[in-house]
Image: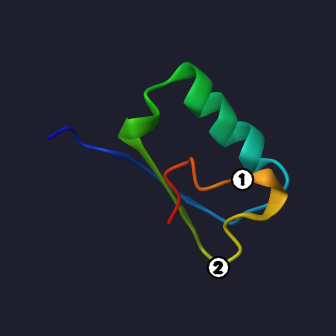
Amino acid sequence: MKNKILHLMALDKFIPPFIKFIKENCEIDRHLFVFLHKERYDYGLTNEYPLI
C-alpha cells in the first residue's frame, strides 16, 4: 500500500484550481483532500475528487 499525501485545507476560490492541477499532473489516487468545514462541494468541486 502506497502512502497518501494528505492535504488539510480551508476551501476558498483558489483550492479547486489547485486540486484540478494535482489531478491533471499527478497521480490523484495518491492524494487525499480533507476540508476543515462541511462545504466540500462549493466552488465547482464534485465527488469525482477524493474529498473528505
Identity of the residue drawn at 71% across and 74% down: 39
| Residue corresponding to mark 1 | 45
Q: Residue furthest left?
A: 1
Q: Badge 1, how many Cα within 10 Å: few under 14, some, many 20+?
A: some
Q: Is residue 35 left or right of residue 43?
A: left
Indicate the quadrant where residue 41 lies: bottom right
User: Are discs 2 and 1 less than 8 Å apart at CB?
Assistant: no
Name the spot of residue 18 as percent of width and height, x first. Answer: 69, 39
Quadrant in which residue 17 is drawn = top right
Is 1 positioned to the left or the right of 36 in the image?
A: left
Color theme of the render:
rainbow
Q: Nearer the viewer, residue 14 or 38?
A: 38
**In-image side of 30 versus 44 (left or right):** left
Vertical placement of residue 39 versus 31, above or below: below
According to the picture, the residue beneath numbered tag 2 turns out to be: 38
- Where residue 38 sits in the image (x, y, percent)? 64, 79
Mark 2: amino acid: Lys
Q: Amino acid at mark 1?
A: Leu
